[in-house]
Amino acid sequence: MIKAISRGGQFGAFSKATAQAIPPPSASVLVPATLPPSSKPLVEIDRALLTSDSLGKAVSSINNFGVISGPGVTTQVRFAHTDVKVPDFTAYRRDSTKSPTSDNDKSLGSRAAFSYLFTAGSLAGAIYGGKGIVHAFVTSMSASADVLAVSTIEVKLSAIPEGQCVTFKWRGKPLFIRHRTQEEISRERAVPLSDLRDPQEDEVRVQKPEWLVVLGVCTHLGCVPIANAGDFGGYYCPCHGSHYDASGRIRKGPAPLNLEVPKYAFTDPDTVLVG
Amino acid sequence: MAAAVGRISASRLLKTNSSLAPFQVCSLSTAHSWTRGRKLLWTSIGVVAGGAGALFLALETSVKATDIELHPPKLPWDHKKILGGYDHRSVRRGWEVYKNVCAACHSMRYLCYRDLVGATHTEAEAKAEAEEQMIEDGPNDVGEMFKRPGKLSDHVPSPYPNEEAARAANGGAYPPDLSYIIPARHGGEDYVFHLLTGYHEPPAGVALREGLHYNPYFVGGAIGMAQALYSEIIEYEDGTPATQSQLAKDVTNFLAWAAFPELEERKQVGIKSIALLSILLFATLYLKRFRFSVMKTRKIQYNPPKKDV
Amino acid sequence: MGLAGTIYQTLFRRSSTAAITIVIGAYATERIIDEGSTLLWKNYNKGKLWDDIKHKYEK
């Protein structure tokens, strides 16, 4: 209120005056209200006049006069125009507030719920639609069906005789599948870990003891090793002389690591699915 | 267009005139000042131009004797209905027809065996279909190409290695690739069906070159492809009677599926989109009215002060 | 205060509950539309879809 008065400038006197009594305005000039000190106030005030609303309500019993005041507006005095025809806005009003005698506070909950339900509904729909669009763009970055179709290879194991290693082409790299003999298995299982450069037990490198599945890429500089050659009966890389055993583990030469074991699974006893 | 509008209406469009609409339309016309003769002249020009246009359109769309082509009538395909998907039993039979009849001359080089999985065949069946064919692969260790049984990832093999070989084997006519033949021909499914079933003896007066066949649905009427579908030419595995029109319907359904395998997913996304967007439409309409009610229920009036006060 | 008033008081009065309501509503919308459209699709194309005939070919 103090702020309003200070902002009100020359109208400050009026806004103060309305707290007690307002004379009907004359046509051209507003005269500051002067009150006889002993007279009874025209309007009984039972609450603090903090807003323009309460100010307006306080003087509403006086004909054709209203006050707007507050930090957001310049203080102004309005005349209620009787010469303005107000259009019928009933179409924009809700049924519960149409009657002049309705208690609008009571229907506030249902009115608010209605509007919020529409907001919530459209937001929920927008989230669903947005999710679909994001999903479409993100999945467009994943591998296409033809790439996925050649990313796995199925190998019939019955075609590989015991003691033989067969090379397949998989994702552009050679893939060794070796049918190990019982003698090779027992030999590799007996190797102590302390003898190995890259210590790994044979049990963790194979799923079934008789089948070894490794990538045929030497871990030194990427040559393709030769099967059933070298000092340890496994693989021998001709480029720089790395020797691997029948479990694909590095035993001698410059290579630092064992041959890589790809992800594979036995779909049935006769078929292995690599990739 | 904008210039023409500007010339006719000039500044009158900008004039704010809140009086009744018909008067405003009248005042937009520039013809009210014309003489009677001028109005008559322009009316006659309009009638003549309109009549000439209508005549031109009628002649344009009429059947011409020089264009010996029969337009195929429309058939009620399942997948052409708004919510319709493919008849997968028919598509499966169509694959049999393609494999046993069409594949002798026509390639489908964009179709893979893996595409059949989940549409016409189970994975095991599709693998078996692929393994029937020998696919060229390689090069092997010694740099030579070799043949191996097909895999799911392989494309359907073509009957000829290249277009020249296909032309040489078919008297100069090139059997087109069938992967996308349905969208590639006017009339789509209807055309393919009627082409396959429309062979008959050439009418009197039509002379055909050696090696050509008469088909009224083919442009020009003379087609290099001989009639391929006869009743009972193959036997369906599901026991459906293999009449000529059944064979043609099935292979057309199959070709439509091969060209648009995503049709069913597309239509389902369409159903979802329409459901969601209609919810959003009504919500948006309500919210617009709700938000704008503050603006719409306000009246601003300015009464200029009288000068003599 | 009827049902609508209760909904307003419990769900939308506070921004936090309103946000949770909207997220749950989005999930419910997705489920309803997805399931509903699949149901419509399967009913309309009954007997023709691969799902309807695959039992004949699977062992």
Image (cartoon, rainbow, N blue to C red):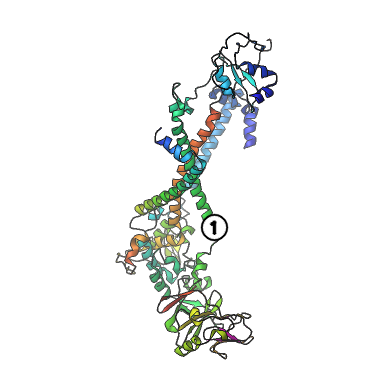
Image vertical order of residue C47 relative to residue A61, above or below: below
Residue A248 location, quadrant: bottom right
Residue A55 in the image: x percent, y percent?
58, 20
Quarter occupied by the N terminus of chain B = top right
Q: Position of residue B55 (x, y in %)?
A: 50, 41
Q: Is residue B8 magenta?
A: no
Q: Quadrant of the C terminus of chain B?
A: top right
Residue placed under numbered mark 1 in the picture: A138
- Looking at the picture, which amino acid does disc 1 mark? Val
Q: Quadrant of residue B203?
A: bottom left
**Vertical position of residue B65 compared to residue A119: above or below:** below
Give the crowd class for mark 1: few <14, some 14-19, many >=20 residues within 10 Å: few
Which residue lies most toward the right here?
Answer: A10
Q: Disc 1 sits on a residue from what chain?
A: A
Query: What is the secondary structure assignment of the residue under circle 1?
Result: helix
Q: Residue B104 appears at what percent x and percent y?
A: 43, 71
- Residue A106 shown left or right of residue A84 in the figure: left
Pinpoint residue A115: horizontal percent, then vertical percent: 47, 36
Residue depicted at x 35% and y 52%? C44
Q: Which residues are magenta?
A: A242-257
From the viewer's perspective, is residue B195 above or below residue B81?
below
In the image, what residue occupies the spot 42% across and 36% down? Answer: C4
